Image (spheres, grey):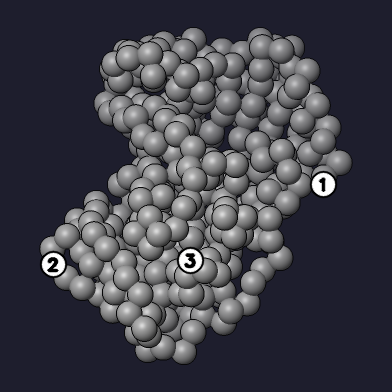
Amino acid sequence: MTSPEPVAVIGAGILGACVGWNLSRLGAQVIFVDAGQPGEGVTNWSFSWVNASNKTVRRSYFDLNVAGMAAYRELADAIGPGSWWHPSGHLRWADDPAQLLETVDLLARWDYRVELITGAEVRRHLEPALSIPDEVPVAFYPDEAWVHGRRLVSRLVREAGAEHRFGTAVRGIDADGSGWTVSLSDGTRLHVSAVVNAAGPRASHIARLISRHLPMRREPGVVTRVSCPQVPVHRAMHAPHVEIRPDGNDSVVLHSREVDALIDTGEAPAALAGRLQEAARYVVHELSGSRIAQTRVVERPIPIDGFPSVGAVPSAPGYYEAVSHSGITLGPVIGRLLASEIVSGERSDLLADFRPERFP
């Protein structure tokens, strides 16, 4: 990319922030555009679990997520860990351990660090507050982490030193001969050399503005934050029926795929939050005194086949996509690889299976 004009990064969630930060490090001018505020969309309403243990459906996807974990360690070295980075490992156990044990065996063959321990050992050495049977097998993934997404995004956006248009929606994107003109809801027209579509659940809408079809799944999720005087858990965990992780000094985040399945039944978000809280109390009795603080139902940004769409779109020179579920895990690696592609044209083999051109 030789044009002196900036790159418009549409979407200031974790993916957009990572792309913009890496572009700035490579010397590109960046303009962040977001209808909301940095990190306050899906990024702030995610379980925010950095992992590859749940990404075994395709080896290339697993490898990309392993690279994402390594990229987090590099990012923490580059900007300092601060209050956004929590590399405390992850726990998982299940009512029926057969599938868990099968996954543990697969991951061990793929050289992914995992320790199989008992519930009693978990309580003794890692999480004393858990209500978990002594003999139940538990997978401990020591290299996994959780991230405070909103804090990380704010840090990256600030350190990028980029121009921004927050609280402003994109109304149009038009090729103008030398690049693109991005029209905003406040009447501003930005002349840019390239456009990065990192708009999360709105990515298909942004793609349509250039007559591009980006098929997306509809897969809503509900996340609840409960407040408690003292956070009784130290790391992210998947218990039967509920996911639990700390979220700072006085807050715990709860999520469950089983509760997500009830969203379209018409049950109110407050009732869904109550289900999450009740499931969490069963696992961590100390959460019995917790109070539901915030609940949000959000659309996950998932391309139709479940895998990321990252890179250039050959039919629209200067237009790039950075759209993926698991954006928390993949943000730093996608940000680095896509920024390099935009600036130098270099295409990484890690993204070979996830190119946008697979969608006609």
Position of residue 266 measured from the top left corner of the image (x, y, whole percent): 32, 14
In this view, 99 is above or below 246: above
Position of residue 95 measured from the top left corner of the image (x, y, whole percent): 66, 12
In this view, 87 is above or below 96: below
Left or right: residue 85 versus residue 95 is left
Q: Which mark is residue 11?
A: none
Residue occupied by mark 1: 111
Residue 349 visible to the viewer = yes
Residue 72 visible to the viewer = no
Left or right: residue 51 versus residue 168 is right
Which residue is found at the position 44% from the left and 83% from the top? 27
Position of residue 31 measured from the top left corner of the image (x, y, whole percent): 31, 72
For marks 3 and 1 on the same chain, the one whose residue lies earlier in the sequence: 1
Badge 1 amino acid? Asp
Q: Closest to the observer: 6 or 319? A: 319
Q: Nearer the viewer, mark 3 or mark 1?
A: 3
User: Which image quadrant is residue 349 in?
Assistant: bottom right
**Residues tagged 1 and 2 counted as in contact (Cβ below 8 A):** no
Residue occupied by mark 2: 187
Badge 3 amino acid? Tyr
Q: Closest to the observer: 61 or 204? A: 204
**Residues tagged 3 and 1 counted as in contact (Cβ below 8 A):** no
Which residue is found at the position 64% from the left and 72% from the top? 347
Q: Residues within 10 Å of mark 2 (few under 14, many from 20)?
A: few
Position of residue 264 measured from the top left corner of the image (x, y, whole percent): 39, 19
Which residue is found at the position 56% from the left and 75% from the top? 340
Residue occupied by mark 3: 320
Query: Which secondary structure, mark 3?
Result: strand
User: Which image quadrant is residue 197 in?
Assistant: bottom left
Query: Which secondary structure, mark 2?
Result: loop
